[in-house]
């Protein structure tokens, strides 16, 4: 009886927080769904009318949508590959004992604390700028033509910028996982005749799978909504070369003043994110079970 | 074959000299136990033999071959670790087969050897489980299985029983001894538990602060310890060490007498009051405060109705007294 009562009491106690969180989520979602079925243009206020699925039809059939979809997946995939591979490599390096370990570890984490707009501007103006950038100077020092990263390889440049800021996150998580690897297991494998590469393949990688899964899942959530880096560097261009879904939604609602179309795009983005999430959980979610 | 010779090997970590020059020969087929208190360098010595640590100077020979700079895998030794060091994401079968797989042995032969090892160690029905699903004793056996399949020149055990409960420890101790009798391979076993050392060893090496205090068979060490350290370390309960006037009377600096050699008689020379009586059934341990001698531990066989506060007299056996000089060496 006591447990039954305390359980009811517990439910009552947590309900305000749960209800608040639920409203916080459901009201904006509901409004977005509602707007997505309206003909709602900011240039013609007060003329909203019901249009059914027209907004969805026009959003999907514009060729920019498919470009944005491919760009979104390339951006997520590219950054994941760079951060996971680079993160494992950096973690392996930082796990070695060396002088000044503490300071180096703090410095490696630093890029994660730089806000996206700032890091993108630093990359754009100080590194990738074809006239004043560091890369241009290096190219000129070797007598080469400076490469204009943001106009000739806009998506790759943005992948590089985003990967730079997420690499510390992956490194940090993988480093802690690496430190929990049993030293005696490594020694046992050494006695069993396993080379460094075999020890890496048969012991280190399996030990890291769970942390890699965590890194992939968390980063995917954030990388699907990359926006600031695109806004301050390429504005989605040239053309739609670096437009991803969040940027397309922004362009639709605030550059074309089409709130209805933007809302429809937002709902499509939510559905796609869920498809990606289900796909990922099916694929690697079993790594999280013990 | 499995003869290991250590010639004046040393090991220092930075400025700390862990092992001063040390010589030791381990003969083929011997069961050698390194025993000593925590931090005496016994595990370090084992790791030096295994090749997991580099020696600072000296020479290691295995079967007459110089192995001083050989990589761990090249020495043909197999090691069982204290934590078992099983690979957690591999099945028992894959764990045992791992060294064979690394040696690129054909699959059929791998399977045959794994099945064989599993049969010897009673693991056949667990081959497809993961280490996490096994009990402590089974994990221990998997670790031994992984060592057996390599058919090593010698097995190295690093305190393998310290994570097991008392009952299982006794069983595993016997299993390892039986394994040694059937395989007849050299085994080097590190422990801090003198009971394990006494029960398993052909040859015990008593270590203290990296130095070898004495080498010999269990009974040799028990009967004629070379110095105070060995005398105090071998035997349970510990030997009584008496200093002062009573020792002077016997012409030595320290007089040693084992608890099991003291006799409770009607009119012994040492009279004292029982401070504590522990009744184990088979034995009774007494702590007796003897005037002019000090606190003595006495072991009397069987169930004796002796209890706290009783006054008894003890007879030290004249032929079983150990006498040590001021430097702690046996006289």
Image: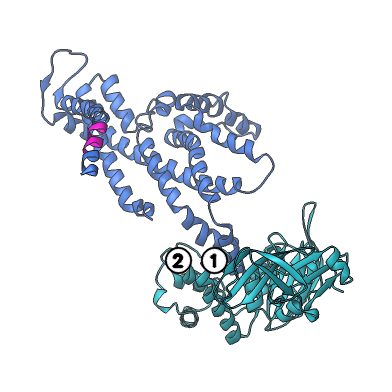
Name the residue nearer the viewer: A133 or A110.
Answer: A110
The residue identified by callout 1 is: B84
Question: Any magenta on residue B123?
Answer: no
The residue identified by callout 2 is: B131
Q: Quadrant of the C terminus of chain B?
A: bottom right
- Res B69 visible: no
Name the residue nearer the viewer: A148 or A95.
Answer: A95
Q: Relative to A41, does residue B72 appear above or below in the rendering?
A: below
Q: Quadrant of residue B192?
A: bottom right
Give the side of residue A192 with respect to residue A270, left or right: right
Q: Which chain is blue?
A: A
Span highlighted in magenta in the image: A8-14
Q: Chain of mark 1?
A: B
Q: Which chain is cyan?
A: B
Q: x%, y% of residue B181? A: 60, 86
Q: Quadrant of residue B300?
A: bottom right
């Amino acid at each position: 009886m006591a447990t039954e009562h305390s359980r009811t009491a517990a439910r009552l106690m947590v309900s305000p927080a749960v209800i608040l969180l639920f409203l916080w989520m459901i009201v904006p979602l509901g409004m977005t769904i509602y707007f997505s079925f309206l003909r709602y243009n900011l240039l013609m206020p007060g003329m909203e009318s019901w249009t059914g699925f027209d907004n969805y039809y026009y959003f999907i059939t514009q060729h920019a949508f498919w470009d944005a979809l491919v760009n979104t997946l390339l951006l997520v995939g590219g950054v994941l590959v760079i951060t996971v591979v680079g993160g494992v490599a950096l973690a392996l390096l930082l796990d070695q004992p060396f002088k000044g370990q503490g300071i180096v570890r703090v410095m490696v984490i630093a890029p994660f604390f730089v806000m996206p707009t700032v890091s993108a501007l630093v990359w754009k103006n100080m590194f990738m700028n074809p006239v004043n950038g560091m890369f241009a100077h290096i190219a000129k020092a070797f007598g080469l033509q400076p490469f204009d990263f943001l106009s000739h390889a806009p998506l790759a440049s943005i992948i590089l910028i985003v990967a730079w800021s997420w690499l510390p996150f992956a490194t940090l998580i993988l480093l802690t996982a690496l430190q929990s690897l049993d030293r005696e297991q490594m020694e046992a494998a050494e006695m069993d005749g396993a080379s460094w590469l075999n020890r890496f393949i048969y012991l280190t990688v399996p030990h890291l799978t769970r942390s890699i899964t965590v890194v992939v899942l968390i980063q995917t959530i954030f990388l699907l909504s990359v926006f600031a880096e695109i806004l301050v560097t390429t504005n989605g261009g040239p053309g739609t070369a670096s437009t991803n879904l969040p940027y397309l939604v922004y362009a639709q609602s605030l550059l074309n003043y089409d709130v209805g179309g933007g809302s429809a795009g937002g709902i499509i983005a939510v559905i796609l994110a869920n498809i990606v999430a289900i796909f990922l959980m099916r694929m690697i979610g079993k790594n999280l079970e013990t | 074959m499995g003869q290991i010779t250590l010639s004046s090997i040393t090991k220092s970590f930075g400025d700390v000299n862990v092992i001063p020059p040390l010589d030791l020969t381990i003969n083929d087929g011997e069961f050698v136990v390194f025993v000593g208190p925590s931090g005496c360098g016994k595990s370090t010595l084992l790791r030096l033999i295994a090749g997991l640590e580099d020696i600072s100077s000296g020479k290691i020979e295995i079967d007459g071959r110089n192995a001083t700079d050989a990589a761990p895998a090249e020495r043909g030794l197999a090691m069982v670790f204290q934590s078992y060091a099983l690979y957690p994401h591999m099945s028992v079968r894959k764990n045992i087969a791992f060294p064979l797989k690394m040696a690129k042995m054909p699959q059929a032969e791998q399977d045959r050897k794994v099945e064989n090892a599993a049969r010897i160690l009673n693991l056949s029905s667990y081959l497809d489980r993961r280490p996490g699903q096994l009990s402590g004793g089974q994990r221990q056996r998997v670790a031994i299985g992984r060592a057996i399949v390599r058919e090593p020149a010698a097995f190295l055990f690093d305190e393998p029983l310290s994570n097991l409960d008392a009952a299982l420890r006794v069983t595993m101790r016997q299993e390892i001894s039986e394994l040694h009798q059937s395989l007849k391979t050299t085994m080097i076993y590190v422990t801090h538990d003198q009971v394990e050392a006494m029960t398993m060893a052909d040859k015990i090496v008593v270590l203290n602060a990296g130095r070898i205090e004495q080498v010999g068979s269990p009974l040799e060490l028990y009967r004629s310890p070379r110095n105070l350290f060995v005398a105090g370390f071998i035997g349970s309960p510990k030997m009584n060490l008496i200093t002062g006037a009573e020792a002077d009377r016997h012409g030595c600096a320290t007089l040693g007498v084992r608890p099991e050699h003291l006799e409770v008689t009607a009119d012994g020379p040492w009279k004292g009051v029982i401070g504590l009586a522990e009744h184990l059934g088979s034995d009774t341990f007494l702590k007796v405060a003897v005037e002019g001698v000090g606190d003595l531990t006495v072991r009397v066989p069987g169930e004796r109705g002796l209890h706290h506060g009783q006054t008894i007299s003890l007879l030290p056996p004249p032929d079983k007294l150990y006498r040590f000089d001021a430097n702690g060496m046996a006289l």
